[in-house]
Image (cartoon, grey):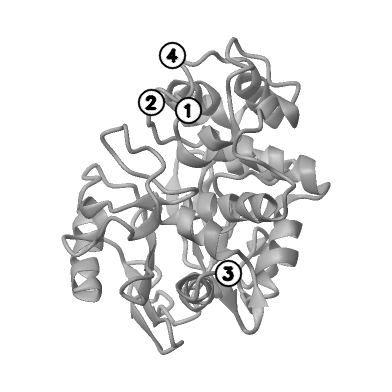
Amino acid sequence: LFPGCVIGIVKKDGSREVLPFGNFTYESSSETVKENTIYDTASLTKSIPTSCLALQLIDEGKLKLSDKLIDYIPEFNNSDRENVLIKHLLTYTLDGYGLASAMDGTDGTSLYKRKASDMKHVLFTHDFEKRPGTIFKYSNIPSALLGLVIEKISGTSLDRLADEKLFRRLAMNRSTFSPEAFPLQEIAPTEIDDWRGIVHGIVHDESAYICKKENIIVGHAGLFSTAPDILNFLEMLLNKGTLYGKKFFSEEIVNQMTTNQIPDFDDSTGLGWELNQSRYMGKYSTSSTFGKTGFTGTLCVCDIEKGIAYVILSNRTYPKRQPDSQAINTFRKNIGEIVLK
């Protein structure tokens, strides 16, 4: 399934265990995975830090769930521009799937030739197939838009804001949107693809990669991190938003992370997090167990009631992404049933 991984577990009292397994690649000369090996976390970025930065702004009274997207991004100009709310971005109740396909392109070569401005134009003008708030559909689009809102309100880039408001305060010293600051020997490679060669020390997500080349940080992918760093974040959530004597969220905001925001839908999601997803959390998840997965083979899950959280970082896309997309969820589910039981 992957050449190596790190599994980390933390409890509310701070006790933890970090377990590294395997190697960076399947070659015998490959680096051995260590506790502090850096992985591309892929879509964990959507929650850590993007959604959580937005939730901090809500805590501070600088943003409301009922605010319109165009209050902050007036250049957003599709036929639903008046109807997209911040809540839709934090709950994935925006029909962004077709839009994501249009923005990302249909093949690697055409995407590689595109520019950030091309994708932003599609993002701002492509129509949805269904009205905002009428469908729960996971895609990159809500987090991409949310990242722009956060930058507009804060007046700074997502990576700098994440460093200032979250990473430095939580001693997440190996969490970054700039993996080039670390030696490649400390970073697990992600994939060998046809148009970038070995994807190693650069963001795996194609649209995030194109934007990063133009020094643009996006909200849906790009965070590189380690298991111990993610455990620091999860320990803070287990303690309802406070750690090291520092407050990051109000208890009310943390409660909204664990409360189903779409009770009328045949699914569940908190603010900025997925809820009670037994397909990757296992049968011991509850209605308030929340977490997030990443395409590269990553996962973090938090259960405040049980007082335990865990992270899995791997490079399951190396050397090539596998056709069986459910195999990684079977692994995640097995680990969840060990930890959450």
Q: Nearer the viewer, mark 2 or mark 3?
A: 2
Horizontal side of 247 relative to 238 (left or right) equals right
Disc 3 + disc 4, Cβ < 8 Å: no
C-alpha gap between disc 4 and disc 2: 10 Å
The disc, 4 or 2, on the residue closer to the chain's N-terminal end is: 4
Extreme-right residue of the structure: 155
The quadrant where residue 25 appears? bottom left
Label disc, if present, on residue 129 of the rendered structure: 4
Disc 1 + disc 2, Cβ < 8 Å: yes
* Residue 86, above or below 240: above
The disc, 3 or 4, on the residue closer to the chain's N-terminal end is: 4
Regarding residue 115, the answer to whether it shows in the image is: no
Which residue shows up at 43% across the image and 50% down it? 192
Label disc, if present, on residue 153 of the rendered structure: none
Residue at numbered disc 2? 135
C-alpha gap between disc 1 and disc 4: 10 Å
C-alpha gap between disc 2 and disc 3: 41 Å
Q: How many marks?
A: 4
The disc, 2 or 3, on the residue closer to the chain's N-terminal end is: 2
Residue at numbered disc 1? 94
Q: Amino acid at mark 2?
A: Ile
Q: Nearer the viewer, residue 54 or 213?
A: 54
* Crowding at mark 2 (Cα within 10 Å: few <14, some 14-19, many 20+): some
Q: Position of residue 99 (x, y in %)?
A: 50, 22
Horizontal side of 264 relative to 224 (left or right) equals left
